[in-house]
Amino acid sequence: MAISLVLQLAGLVLFMRPGDGPRTLAAAILFGFGMGAAVPLQSTTTAASFGPKAFARASGLLRPFMLPLHAGGAPFAGYLYDRTGSYALAFTVFAVCYFFAALAIALLPPRAADR
């Protein structure tokens, strides 16, 4: 999961830098692979962290915290664009969030046994 977030971060950083077609393509590929991996890995990480017996409960408890972040990202970026005329600040905020999320996932201790 941490690798997925790092790929998304790398793609986002490339998107933040003005460039030509190949750079934009590389950014899209990195971000796309990272995001594509994040969806199935989220369930895998939840199962690995909480165990199969607590998977459904843990997933259900995580969703209310994730919903505002998922639903609010695009409007937040749009608001910052309207205020500043650029997506740079929004991309920077998202990049910082990706960095700390990857760090937190990487530092998760391995689960000793199924709960």
Image (spheres, rainbow, N blue to C red):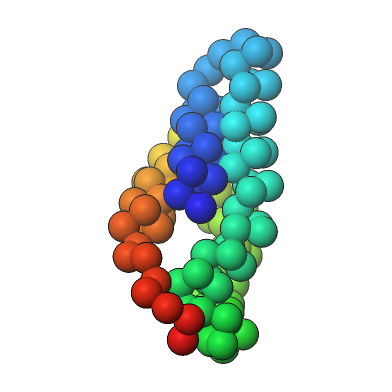
Q: For the point 68% across and 13% down, which residue is it?
A: 21
Q: For the point 66% across and 59% down, which residue is it?
A: 40
Q: For the point 31% across and 57% down, which residue is it?
A: 107
Vertical arrangement, residue 115 with respect to residue 9, above or below: below
Visible residue check, residue 47: yes
Residue 61: where, in percent of width, then height? 53, 85
Residue 27: where, in percent of width, then height? 60, 27
Which picture quadrant has residue 41? bottom right
Q: Nearer the viewer, residue 27 or 111?
A: 111
Visible residue check, residue 61: no
Vertical arrangement, residue 78 with respect to residue 67, above or below: above
**Residue placed furthest toward the front:** 113
Residue 108: where, in percent of width, then height? 35, 63
Q: Nearer the viewer, residue 111 or 14?
A: 111
Q: For the point 32% across and 65% down, which residue is it?
A: 109
Vertical arrangement, residue 42 with respect to residue 37, above or below: below
Q: Nearer the viewer, residue 104 or 52?
A: 52
Left or right: 110 as drawn, with respect to 31: left
